[in-house]
Image: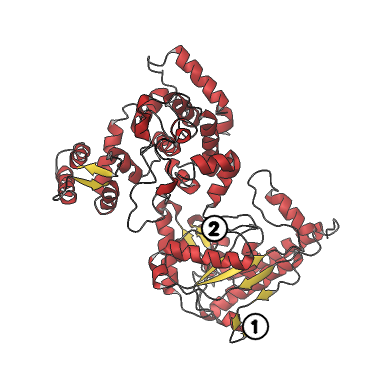
Amino acid sequence: VTCTGIPLIRILLTIIINLILLLYYLTLTCCLLIEEKPRGTLRFFTTWPGYIGCRAILFVWGFYYIPRKFPKCGGSVCGAGCCMSDLTAPILIANHSSALTDFIILLAFHLPAFLAMKQVRSYPILGRLAAGIGCIFVDRENGKSGVTQQICDRADEYTPGWRDPRLAIFPEGTVTQAQNLCKYRSGAFTPGAPVQPICIKYTSRGQDLSTLNLSGGPSDIAVFLRLITNIWNWVELEYLPVYFPSEEEKENPRLYASNVQRVMADSLGFPYSDHTFEDMYLQGKVGETYYNQHVSHRISGLQLKKLTGMKLKMVSKLLIAFSKLDQLADAPAEIQRVNAKPSALPTDSPKTAQPSDEGILGERSAAEVPKAGDELAVAGPGLLNRLSFLALAQGMTFKSLSVADEVFDVVSRGGVVDVVGAAAGLGLLLGNLPSENQIRIAFEWDEKGLVSKSRARAVMEVLEEGEEKKSGDGVVDKLYENKTAVSINAIVQAANTSPVIGRAAEAYVEQKLPSRKASSEQKEAPRFGESTLANLKDLQKRAELVKEELSA
């Protein structure tokens, strides 16, 4: 039921409530009563107004009554008191389908800490308020490992009780559809601590409040207007039993995350997927069939973001352009070599013993990799020739064709690149290719995933004479002791403790790109004649690689 007579009143009341909270916390700030992670009586004064204010905002927005369902205990249903006293789990896990209300709902009942950007800490009032509820301030320049470490530290420091704030995390990593659970990321489960799953259910009696906008869906503003024009909005919280991980789950955060996702999906009645949000977004852009056949079996959407260093919107433009240029009619004679290794950065190489979320390469099954003799996989969709790659690279990065041509020689196999090789090429052009992948390019491995000792020596030769050169030779001798070849994954793992491997690989790749620093205005090399340039412009037009649109 909707009514157009109440939105302005609701907006006015929301502003008034926020002003009251602002004045209260401003007073505490002036008195210097708010400190990071306050405890005892001081925490009481900083948290309870937050509980009351957030619940008041929800009431104004039409959530007059929010039922909470608690797990059965000893044959009877626990009440609010029992649930609130069960504070053994330092981390709250919730599904995330509304950017507008999910945070406020959790704040209204738990006032947990969230993850916040480091810059928020320096804000005059908001910074002290965020510190007052115990938020973790994340320095994004340190990357994901810094976030994970802070989550582990918070879980270790947590003391069950109301004195310490619990940490609330949405493991999907972003707002997703209200009828589906995307793959849970493992950061919240890395500490191996118990978690409290909370299912946020927007019931059928209310309108859809999901703020996900994959393709043509309602905008955040439209969802907010829908929210404040509803006379009554419905939401229910279901608290599942605290999930205590097994020893196997503690050792494998991905398994832990997957099992919790499955339990929550069963409670919500939603299907769950191994696709990340990025996969779902990109699938909607290029079509389910194309994405599943020629992209997802090689690399995930999240890995494509890391490989190129691009934002998701630009990655989608990359895939759209790749699919439109993907018209390789005449495969080179050496195309059979591509069957086993379509790109310089395969996701089907031998797995490491304990794969990590930090890695770029995916966990794609070898059974899903195109097989020899599959004409569609070899010469059809899924591969770009040199000219198509040049059109893609120059259209996406605006670098000179000379640089793009050199990059193609680095990332191609058999005269073609697949989507992983194309993404790696763009990562090189933009200077964003992670060190792990530069190692995989420099140490050319065979179809069995092995790197010969002579190849390793050749890469290390780029190091200048001195201590670094001596260190590099020592690493090779240790790796290849009584061996003629080692796996590429062994070299990548060795680079974690011997940074000289990564430096050698980066220098080796840099040697192959003499025009790397050329500007986009550089005059093209003579080998690119007028007919080639004309063909490139036609290909870019077909791929919708319009400079004005990409720069917007």
Q: Quarter holding the C terminus?
A: top right
Is 487 in front, or is 64?
Answer: 487
Which residue lies most toward the top here?
A: 530
**Which residue position holds label 2?**
172
Q: Vertical placement of 528 versus 185: above or below?
A: above
Quarter assignment of residue 527: top left
Is 548 in front, or is 236?
Answer: 236
Visible residue check, residue 24: yes
Amino acid identity at mark 1:
Gly
Circle 1 residues within 10 Å: few <14, some 14–19, many ≥20 = some
- Disc 1 element: loop
- Disc 2 element: loop
Q: Position of residue 346 (x, y in %)?
A: 38, 42
Visible residue check, residue 411: no
Badges 1 and 2: C-beta atoms under 8 Å apart? no
Q: Vertical placement of 488 versus 393: above or below?
A: below
Q: Residue at x 64, y 51 (%)?
A: 212
Amino acid identity at mark 2:
Glu
Circle 2 residues within 10 Å: few <14, some 14–19, many ≥20 = many
Q: Position of residue 312 (x, y in %)?
A: 53, 44
Is 523 in front, or is 296?
Answer: 296
Q: Position of residue 25 (x, y in %)?
A: 61, 68
**Which residue position holds label 1?**
79
- Would you say 193 lies left or right of 353 here? right
